[in-house]
């Protein structure tokens, strides 16, 4: 069984990694987690070529790819994949604060953007992110929303981290042929709740924390009318 967790940055990918790495998850499924290196949404053919032949019988997560590039991967005949989509307006705000404060500076781009954003007002910084992210984000989300594969389950960030989290997560596990009991699912979701990971209630903001706020629609608190 090979499972591909596909997404765009800032849509809960680190949360899923915590779940997939947990002992409860491992004991029931014995699927190792594999996170590709040089893994970000890109048109760089050298990077995409490296991702083409990923290993099998693993959970591959997160995989930041456009659908076209995912479709070109060499995959086993029977595989499961899911894609987490998020309101692009919230992606803008999440990226703004992450690039400015909390993202691990593992790539020169992050350091460059951090320096740039810290030299601007907040409004100008958010506009900068809107201008640099919108075209690529639109292209990425459109591809995944238009695909019709039965192997791929499309899930909204707002649902998997919303009031129906248990139901949505349980459906995802069934789609991926992963067997966990009701109690095991509840234990995992409680263990990795926003409150337990961040030490704050969902909606309580810490702009310098990777888990900043955790509430959908937060863009309304930041966007100007023009934005």
Image (cartoon, rainbow, N blue to C red):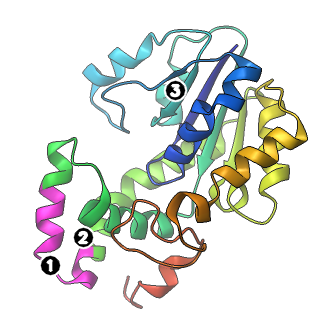
Q: Identify which residue, 198 or 95, lies in the foreground.
A: 198
Q: Position of residue 73 (x, y in %)?
A: 50, 17
Q: Is residue 138 left or right of residue 43?
A: right
- Dot 2 or dot 1: first in sequence order is 1
How many marks on residues? 3
Secondary structure of the residue carrying numbered label 2: helix
Q: Main secondary structure of the magenta part?
A: helix
Specify whether residue 4 is painted magenta.
no
Real-space Cα distance between discs 3 and 1? 36 Å
Q: Which residues are magenta?
A: 112-125
Residue 171 visible to the viewer: no
Q: Position of residue 219 (x, y in %)?
A: 48, 78
CB within 8 Å, label 2 to label 1:
yes
Q: Which mark is residue 120?
A: 1
Secondary structure of the residue carrying numbered label 1: loop
Q: Mark 2, residues whose alpha carbon is within 10 Å: few (<14), some, or many (≥20)?
A: some
Mark nearer the viewer, 2 or 1: 1
Residue at horizontal 48 percent and vertical 32 percent from the top: 63
Q: Is residue 76 left or right of residue 207?
A: right
Mark nearer the viewer, 3 or 1: 1
Residue at horizontal 56 percent and vertical 67 percent from the top: 214
Real-space Cα distance between discs 2 and 3? 28 Å
Secondary structure of the residue carrying numbered label 3: helix
Residue that lies at the very extreme toward the bottom in this rendered image: 225
Q: Mark 2 sits on what residue? A: 128
Q: Quadrant of residue 165?
A: bottom right
């Amino acid at each position: 069984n090979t499972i591909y967790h596909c997404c765009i940055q800032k849509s809960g990918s680190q949360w899923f990694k915590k779940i997939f790495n947990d002992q409860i998850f491992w004991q029931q499924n014995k699927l190792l987690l594999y996170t590709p290196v040089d893994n970000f949404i890109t048109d760089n053919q050298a990077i995409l070529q490296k991702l083409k032949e990923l290993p099998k019988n693993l959970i591959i997560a997160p995989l930041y790819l456009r659908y076209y590039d995912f479709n070109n991967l060499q995959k086993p005949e029977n595989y499961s994949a899911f894609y987490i989509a998020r309101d692009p307006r919230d992606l803008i705000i999440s990226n703004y604060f992450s690039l400015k404060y909390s993202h691990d500076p593992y790539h020169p781009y992050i350091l460059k953007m951090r320096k740039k954003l810290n030299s601007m007002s907040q409004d100008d910084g958010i506009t900068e992110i809107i201008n640099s992210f919108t075209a690529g984000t639109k292209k990425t989300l459109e591809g995944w929303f238009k695909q019709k594969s039965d192997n791929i389950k499309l899930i909204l960030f707002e649902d998997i981290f919303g009031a129906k989290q248990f139901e949505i997560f349980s459906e995802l596990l069934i789609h991926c042929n992963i067997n966990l009991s009701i109690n095991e699912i509840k234990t995992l979701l409680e263990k990795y709740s926003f409150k337990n990971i961040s030490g704050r209630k969902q909606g309580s903001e810490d702009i310098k924390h990777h888990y900043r706020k955790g509430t959908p629609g937060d863009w309304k608190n930041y966007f100007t009318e023009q934005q």
